Amino acid sequence: MSLDQNFEKAQQDVKALTKRPSDQQLLDLYSYFKQATEGDNITSKPGMFDIKGQFKWAAWKDKSGMSKDIAMQKYIDLVAALLVTHS
């Protein structure tokens, strides 16, 4: 399968998890997905009262400069690891 096909499969596979990943794992999933689908984070930082939004924004911002292909592969690898430990 191609990288794009594996990425799409990982998006479906992540829905099959029976245990909730850690907050850090969820942030990693989010940030790799956003980097793979939208590229570098150029959005405005959320307000000080949006704590969850700030963590998500910062996690995505940390991936700046990462290529789409690398972000896709890291997302795929993380989902594969979670399927082993959280299914």
Image (cartoon, helix red, strand yellow):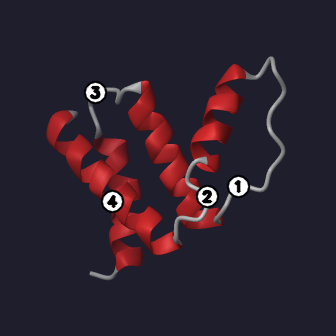
Amino acid of disc 2: Ser
Q: Secondary structure at mark 3?
A: loop
Q: Residue beneath label 2, please?
A: 64
Q: Whole-percent x and y of residue 74? A: 37, 58
Whether residue 77 sits left or right of residue 4 in the image: it is left
Q: Residue beneath label 1, please?
A: 41
Q: Residue beneath label 3, please?
A: 19
Q: Whole-percent x and y of residue 71? A: 46, 63
Task: Characterize the local packing of mark 2: few (<14), some (14-19) or many (20 or more) Cα atoms within 10 angstroms.
Answer: some
Q: Residue beneath label 4, please?
A: 76
**Between marks 3 and 1 in the image, the one whose residue lies nearer the viewer:** 1
The C terminus sits in image quarter? top left
Identify the image quadrant of residue 59. top right
Label 1, label 4: how many angstroms apart (C-alpha)?
20 Å
Q: Earlier in the sequence, mark 2 or mark 3?
A: 3
Identify the image quadrant of residue 70. bottom left
Task: Characterize the local packing of mark 1: few (<14), some (14-19) or many (20 or more) Cα atoms within 10 angstroms.
Answer: some
Amino acid of disc 3: Lys
Whether residue 22 sits left or right of residue 50 in the image: it is left
**Between marks 1 and 2 in the image, the one whose residue lies nearer the viewer:** 2
Label 3, label 1: how many angstroms apart (C-alpha)?
29 Å
Q: Earlier in the sequence, mark 3 or mark 1?
A: 3
**Between marks 1 and 4 in the image, the one whose residue lies nearer the viewer:** 1
Could you tell me if the residues under marks 2 and 3 are in contact, i.e. CB atoms within 8 Å?
no
Q: Earlier in the sequence, mark 1 or mark 2?
A: 1
Could you tell me if the residues under marks 3 and 4 are in contact, i.e. CB atoms within 8 Å?
no
Whether residue 1 sits left or right of residue 58 in the image: it is left
